[in-house]
Image: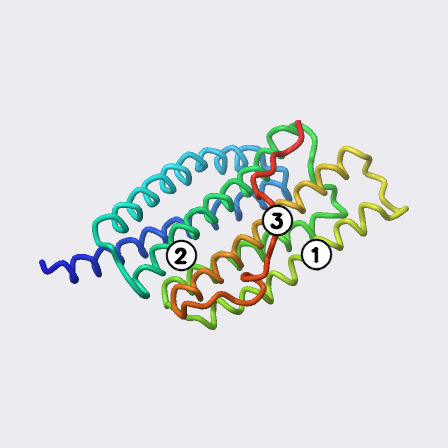
Amino acid sequence: MPLRLEFAAALDRLRESLLVMVSLVTRVMTDATSALVDHDVPLARRALERGWLIHATTADLEAEITDLLARQQPVARDLRTLIASLRIVAALDRMGDLAIHLAELVVVREPDRVVPDSMRDLVSRMGELDAALSTRVGWALYSDDEKLAADCEREDDEVDRLYRDVFHRLTSPDWTAGVRAGVDLAVAARFFERFADQSVTIARRLVFARTGELPPSQRTSSSGRSSRDTPPA
């Protein structure tokens, strides 16, 4: 097979592997959210078991991309695609960590519930939006659709709004679930918010791979926040 065709086939396989990873991360987020809202400890444990697969996939993809960079020495859009892919893999790995941390909260607090009945709808909505965001990222990756990637910003704004709503409720005089429950919910809300942020990071990288330009908010961002937060003991 000519080298150019071989490289194109390798890029196609890379895209397929990224799609599999997006699907896996979305599933873990969906299961972790359901486990939180329904206090489903067995489901939380199943979500945790998928963590090793996310990390193994991350290691394999990073090695594959590094090998392509070294052997093919790509230029122009192909180079941007591989560089963006490295960043996308890292973001997906962080998203997996965040979803896993949500599941860990359920297991750590057993037999107590993490989410009071009064907060179930809000937490469920945040998880649904996060799963929808990662699904949209998958479609953008599959279709190479720049507009789909750009649309992620709007859904992230809704997650941010819900994140603020959580803290409004936690600081309200009507909050009666106690300090530990409040702390757990604040941490969980942070995980949901960071998951959405990482989805937007991926969307911006997809735009970069296609156009060579990063959105202004990405170019000027000075945030060094890490999404590898850990749940309370």
Res 229 quadrant in image = top right
Left or right: residue 170 compared with residue 85: right
Res 13 quadrant in image = bottom left
Q: Amino acid at mark 2?
A: Ala
User: Gap between marks 2 and 1, in whole Å?
Assistant: 29 Å
**What residue do we see at 32% from left, 57% from top?**
15
Rendered view: 197 above or below 212: above
Q: Which residue is mark 1?
A: 162
Could you tell which of marks 2 and 1 lies nearer the N-terminus?
2
Q: Amino acid at mark 3?
A: Phe
Between 48 and 55, the residue placed more toward the observer is: 55
Location of the C terminus by quadrant is top right
SS assignment at label 3: helix
Q: Which residue is mark 2?
A: 84
Q: Which residue is mark 3?
A: 192
Q: Position of residue 3 (x, y in %)?
A: 14, 58
Callout 1: 10 Å neighbours few (<14), some, many (20+)?
some
Q: Amino acid at mark 1?
A: Leu
How many marks do you count on the picture? Answer: 3
User: Gap between marks 2 and 3, in whole Å?
Assistant: 23 Å
**What residue do we see at 58% from left, 33% from top?**
104
Between 49 and 83, the residue placed more toward the observer is: 83
SS assignment at label 2: helix
Q: Are marks 1 and 3 in contact (CB under 8 Å)?
A: yes
